[in-house]
Amino acid sequence: MVTPGEYVPDITEGITRVEDLPRRRIERRSRNYAARMCPRCNHRAGRYAVATRTLHDLGDFRSGHPIDLFLSYSKHHCKRCGCRFSVDVSDLALPKCLYTRRVQQLAVRLVAEDGMPYQHASWHLWRDHRVFVPFATIQNWVEAAGKKKSGHIGDALPGRGVG
């Protein structure tokens, strides 16, 4: 029986084979529309294709499984102005990014607000949220956000570098 304050190890501790890690849970999301308004001329633009993306999201805390979002979205072509565009999914993820915005924001917060090193933030995301993000990716996100360079870390501690 688990008691308060008892150490319970991570279920993935000691696993050396990828096949032994918890299976991912798949959630399907759809942004597939027959027609959308053209952003250039505000004319009705019909769908010409459907595309898919796989996004890694924060995992399920109760079951300990990672979550992948399978997102299908429509691509449209405006016959009036010739514009081709995809449905806006920027609320879920940035273009060409493999992770949701929730993962990015949490990773940047771990480094910028909590002062956690990149490698520890990567481990924290896996251990507590079941999403694996390479620490170099976290470093790119933090530098792009400008949080670490602007001196937010170490402001209250004189004599400590921002590095």
Image (cartoon, helix red, strand yellow):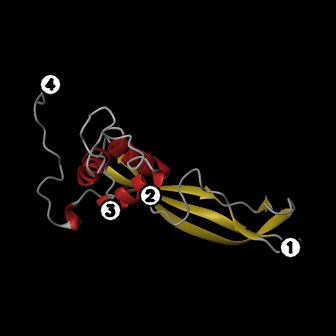
Q: Indicate whether 67 appears above or below 160.
A: below
The amino acid type found where label 1 is placed reads: Lys
- Residue 17, given in percent of the width and then of the height, sits at 17, 67
The answer to whether residue 136 is left or right of residue 68 is left
Q: Are marks 1 and 3 in contact (CB under 8 Å)?
A: no
What residue did someone put label 1 on? 79
| Mark number displayed over residue 136 | 3
Query: Upstream in the sequence, badge 2 or badge 1?
Result: 1
- Which quarter of the figure is the N terminus placed in? top left
Quadrant in the rendering for residue 3: top left
Label 2 to label 3: alpha-carbon separation:
14 Å
Label 4 to label 1: alpha-carbon separation:
65 Å
> Circle 2: is it few (<14), some (14-19), or many (20+) Cα within 10 Å?
many
What residue did someone put label 4 on? 4
Q: Indicate whether 63 appears above or below 80.
A: above
Q: Between tags 1 and 3, which lies in front? A: 3
User: Is 161 or 32 nearer to us in this picture?
Assistant: 161
- Residue 85, given in percent of the width and then of the height, sits at 71, 67
Label 4 to label 2: alpha-carbon separation:
34 Å
Label 1 to label 3: alpha-carbon separation:
43 Å
Query: Upstream in the sequence, badge 4 or badge 1?
Result: 4
Q: Secondary structure at mark 3?
A: helix
> Circle 4: is it few (<14), some (14-19), or many (20+) Cα within 10 Å?
few
The amino acid type found where label 3 is placed reads: Ala
User: Is 99 or 67 nearer to us in this picture?
Assistant: 99
Q: Residue furthest top?
A: 4
Q: Residue at x 44, y 46 (%)?
A: 105
